[in-house]
């Protein structure tokens, strides 16, 4: 089994960006330009490597390979995005890889791309940003370039990629080090571990609370130690956890209470199934049913949000009451969108730079709202 942290180190140490590997400081698939560029790179790497894995490492400085990390990105629906925009789409997996020197809320993103049909070309299915539907991209050194396809795809990287992956194989020392590191770092949040099928080691931690005889956790961190992959991380959500000898199930709840009230709704269920042949699968299912609120009340709150945003844009000092309302602004815009206010998302995106400049707390609440939107949208 490949230790993904070692794989990233080997990719960074062994190669500059090339036809099977790319690195990025960050990506932004929430905006049209960022989404288009990401799809371009996926398309190019898939076409340039028909018979082996390609990789994109995210959270690395381009000049010196310094690992600075990015936010935890739990978009399990990224394959849906790929399928929607690419013809002959490759299989794409996004994983969050923790590094010991990074803050708890930062990881390195690892995107693995594998061509599904190595005899067919991957191309854009439809227009996006400045790229036209039907465009085909290949890797030309470290660049993803549009090309007219009139030559046979050549496999020139399989041996190199296999060697890099073989050098990243896990061993018992890495596994034990990973367990002890997790248990020590999370000792304030009731860390636990379980071995599945005598092979897979899962560690998790969170603040436990009991509501109506049901157990929930907040500040949850879950890692599959064998591969050094962080499967879940949140400082805001409520999570329920169930497991047996064969599987580990996470149900994520999100707080979409209205006007400052706490009201939790199921968002997504994730089940990790462990097999007897040293493999595992991760299956996700969206459970979300958007909450519906009184339209008249919601319209009043929506207008109040707009007025508050205008004050923030003009740099007008906010009262203590308005500061509290500002914390509710991201989620109320999100609720408004789910209740047939289509312009609410435009307003939420417009607020981003002002919330980010205002303070870290409200910006984190903004990012949480966007994360929920992304999950629902790509489902």
Image (cartoon, rainbow, N blue to C red):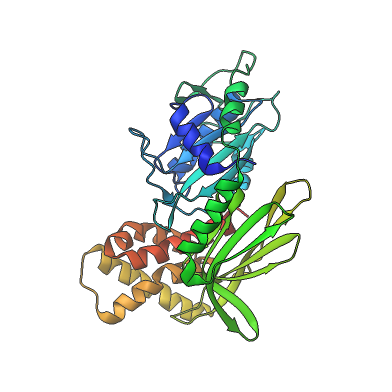
Name the foreground residue: 225 vs 161.
Answer: 225
Q: Quadrant of residue 194?
A: bottom right
- Where residue 128 appears, as percent x and y from the top left, is 51, 38
From this view, report whether residue 241 is shown above or below residue 153.
Answer: below
Q: In percent of the image, x 38 and y 35: which residue is there? A: 65
In the rendered structure, the answer to whether residue 118 lies left or right of residue 297 reads right
- Where residue 197 appears, as percent x and y from the top left, is 74, 55
Name the foreground residue: 51 vs 256.
Answer: 51
Name the foreground residue: 239 vs 1.
Answer: 1
Q: In percent of the image, x 50 and y 80: which residue is there? A: 262
Q: In percent of the image, x 31 and y 71: which residue is there? A: 308
Tell me if residue 203 can be seen: yes
Question: In the rendered view of the protein, which quadrant contains the C terminus?
Answer: bottom right
In the rendered structure, the answer to whether residue 65 lies left or right of residue 372 reads left
Question: In the rendered view of the protein, which quadrant contains the N terminus?
Answer: top right
In the rendered structure, the answer to whether residue 70 lies left or right of residue 170 reads left
- Where residue 165 appears, as percent x and y from the top left, is 59, 33
Q: Quadrant of residue 304?
A: bottom left
From this view, report whether residue 91 is shown above or below residue 143.
Answer: below
- Where residue 18 appears, as percent x and y from the top left, is 48, 24
In the rendered structure, the answer to whether residue 205 lies left or right of residue 307 reads right
Tell me if residue 134 can be seen: no
Please give the count of numbered marks on the rendered protein: 0
Name the foreground residue: 299 vs 201.
Answer: 201
Q: In percent of the image, x 69 and y 26: which residue is there? A: 118
From this view, report whether residue 185 is shown above or below residue 131.
Answer: below
Judged from this view, the residue extending furthest toward the right is: 276
């Amino acid at each position: 089994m490949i230790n993904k942290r070692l794989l990233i180190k080997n990719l960074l140490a062994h190669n500059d960006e090339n036809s099977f590997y790319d690195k990025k400081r960050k990506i932004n698939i929430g905006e049209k330009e960022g989404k288009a560029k990401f799809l371009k790179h996926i398309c190019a790497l898939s076409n340039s490597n028909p018979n082996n894995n390609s990789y994109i490492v995210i959270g690395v400085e381009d000049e010196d390979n310094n690992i600075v990390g990015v936010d935890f990105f739990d978009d399990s629906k990224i394959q849906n995005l790929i399928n929607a925009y690419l013809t002959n789409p490759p299989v794409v997996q996004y994983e969050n890889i923790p590094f010991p020197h990074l803050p708890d809320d930062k990881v390195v993103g690892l995107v693995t791309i594998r061509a599904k049909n190595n005899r067919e070309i991957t191309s854009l299915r439809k227009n996006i940003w400045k790229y036209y539907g039907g465009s085909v991209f290949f890797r030309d050194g470290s660049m993803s370039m549009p090309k007219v396809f009139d030559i046979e795809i050549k496999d020139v990287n399989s041996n190199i990629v296999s060697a890099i992956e073989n050098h990243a194989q896990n061993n018992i020392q890495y596994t034990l080090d990973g367990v002890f590191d997790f248990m020590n770092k999370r000792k304030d949040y009731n860390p636990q571990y379980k071995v599945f099928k005598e092979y897979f080691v899962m560690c998790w931690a969170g603040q436990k609370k009991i509501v109506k005889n049901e157990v929930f956790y907040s500040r949850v961190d879950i890692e599959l130690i064998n591969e050094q992959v962080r499967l879940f991380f949140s400082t805001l959500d409520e999570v329920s956890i169930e497991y047996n000898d064969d599987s580990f199930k996470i149900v994520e709840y999100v707080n979409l209470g209205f006007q400052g009230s706490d009201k939790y709704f199921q968002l997504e269920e994730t089940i990790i199934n462990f097999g007897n042949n040293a493999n595992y699968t991760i299956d996700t299912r969206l459970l979300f049913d958007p909450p519906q609120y009184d339209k008249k009340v919601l319209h009043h709150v929506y207008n109040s949000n707009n007025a508050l945003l205008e004050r923030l844009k003009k740099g007008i000092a906010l009262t203590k009451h308005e500061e509290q309302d500002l914390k509710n602004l991201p989620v109320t815009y999100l609720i408004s969108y789910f209740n047939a206010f289509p312009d609410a998302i435009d307003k939420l995106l417009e607020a981003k730079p002002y919330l980010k400049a205002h303070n870290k707390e409200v910006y984190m609440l903004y990012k949480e709202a966007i994360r929920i939107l992304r999950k629902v949208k790509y489902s």
